[in-house]
Amino acid sequence: MLLTTERLLLRPWQEADVNDLYFYSRDPDVGPACGWAPHQSLEESRAVLRSILSGPECYALCIKETNKPIGTAELMLRGNTDVTDRADECELGYWLGKPYWGRGYMPEAAAELLRHAFEDLNMRAVWCGYHEGNDKSRRVQEKLGFVFHHAHPVQVLGQERISRVNRLTREQWLARR
């Protein structure tokens, strides 16, 4: 599946993307904000590409002109998320390489994934969360209309943090269009 926005191409990850994945994933400002440790090697990134980034609705976010990945976004379907066990709900997860922060790429990509979730996959709700202190992720979710649902403590990289979980229903999404 290929999805497009004004500036981005959302496509499946490919083996040839491993160098770009490693370049952005090794940055200590990227992974820990999302709850994962920076990648330590190209082989670690290759393993992540083959396992974690291989889901049916996992996309490499690419600048259209270069087709080079700058981040990822995924709709985690039932069985790949612990937020919901419903087949008509999913969880949106994402991260973006630091050189591209603050340019509006993530809200643009996530908006297209929400359209895809509600129109193509017929979801009734999309869940999304962030760890307190990750203001960039919080702002993306606010821009997209997500509504706070609940918070709970989680262990992230050996520390207890608060995870804030938000939800956007099809009706809320339609009302914002």
Image (cartoon, helix red, strand yellow):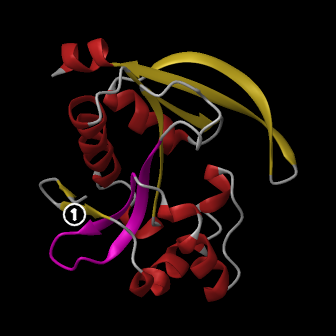
Extreme-left residue of the structure = 6
Q: Name the residue that disc number 1 marks.
A: 9
Q: Position of residue 142 (x, y in %)?
A: 40, 28
Q: Does the magenta segment cover residue 158?
A: no
Q: Name which residue lies at 24% across and 43% down.
A: 112
> Picture quarter containing residue 26?
bottom right
Say above or below: 118 vs 131.
Answer: above
Q: Which residues are magenta?
A: 57-76
Q: Quadrant of the N terminus?
A: bottom left
Q: Main secondary structure of the magenta part?
A: strand
Q: Residue 119 at what x, y percent from top left?
A: 21, 31
User: How many numbered discs?
Assistant: 1
- Quadrant where the C terminus lies? top left
Residue 67 in magenta stretch = yes
Residue 81 appears at what percent x and percent y? 60, 39
Q: Position of residue 145 (x, y in %)?
A: 34, 23
| Left or right placement of residue 85 versus residue 15 in this view | right
Residue that appears at 58% across and 37% down: 130
Q: Residue at x 47, y 66 (%)?
A: 98
Q: Is residue 137 left or right of residue 108?
A: right
Camera-side residue: 28 or 176?
A: 176
At label 1, counting other C-alpha atoms closer than 10 Å, the crowd grade (few under 14, some 14-19, many 20 or more) is many
Badge 1 amino acid: Leu
Residue found at the very far right of the displayed protein: 158
Mark 1: secondary structure: strand
On screen, residue 91 above or below 3: above
Location of residue 108 with respect to 60 vertically, above or below:
above
Image quadrant in which you'd find residue 6: bottom left
Residue at 42 percent of width and 32 percent of height = 141
Q: Is residue 54 above or below residue 131?
A: below
Task: Determine the image quadrant of residue 50.
Answer: bottom right
